[in-house]
């Protein structure tokens, strides 16, 4: 073995020992995020109006959300002060709901509107974590 190869091997071993001595624990923990339903945007839905002579009767105008996001309970990875790490225990989903206005009728007279869920789409897949202590480093 040449002196250059021997020197390279020694530096490699010293560098590997220094990295191992620093530890490989990421110091992370799981933070719980509760379930949330958030409405986005506003879609005005017209009310109904009926006029007979000088009398006008109208129903209230409402607003529907354009879409809503429903996030299931999950965890996120955050920094920790202790020697801990996170491990994945499962998955949770988020959902996106789209809405539209639907005209309501009283016999043959348009009378107000209501919100109707038009479609549902699966959103992002969210990790479920738990905090575990960092184990001893084993070669």
Image (spheres, grey):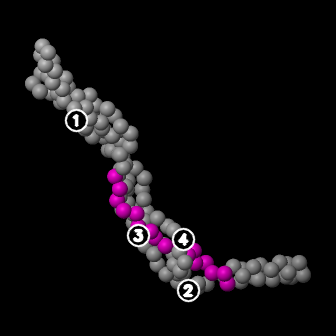
Mark closer to the chain start, 3 or 1: 3
Relative image position of residue 95 (x, y in whole percent):
35, 50
User: Of helix, strand and loop, which one carries label 4?
Assistant: strand
Apparent side of residue 2 relative to residue 118 in the rendered image (left or right): right
> Which segment is the magenta one?
21-37
Question: How many other residues sit within 10 Å of disc 1, few (<14), some (14-19) or many (≥20)?
Answer: some
Numbered badge on residue 79: 4
Mark closer to the chain start, 1 or 4: 4
Check disc 2 and report the residue beneath it.
136
Q: Quadrant of residue 21?
A: bottom right
Numbered badge on residue 89: 3
Mark closer to the chain start, 4 or 3: 4
Q: Which of 33 and 62 is in front in this view?
A: 62
Q: Which residue is drawn at 45% across and 75% down?
A: 131
Relative image position of residue 3 (x, y in whole percent):
90, 81
Gap between marks 3 and 1, in whole Å?
41 Å
Residue 32 shown in magenta: yes
Q: Residue at x 36, y 42 (%)?
A: 67
């Amino acid at each position: 073995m040449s002196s250059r190869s021997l020197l390279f091997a020694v530096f490699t071993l010293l560098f590997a020992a220094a990295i191992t001595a620093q530890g490989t624990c990421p110091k992370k923990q799981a933070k719980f995020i509760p379930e949330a339903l958030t409405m986005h945007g506003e879609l005005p839905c017209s009310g109904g109006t009926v006029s007979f002579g000088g009398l006008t009767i109208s129903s209230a105008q409402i607003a529907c959300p354009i879409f809503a996001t429903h996030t299931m309970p999950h965890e996120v990875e955050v920094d920790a002060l202790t020697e801990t790490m996170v491990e994945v225990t499962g998955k949770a989903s988020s959902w996106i709901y789209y809405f539209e206005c639907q005209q309501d009728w009283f016999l043959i007279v348009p009378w107000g509107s209501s919100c109707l869920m038009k479609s549902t789409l699966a959103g992002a897949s969210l990790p479920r974590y738990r905090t575990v202590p960092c184990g001893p480093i084993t070669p």
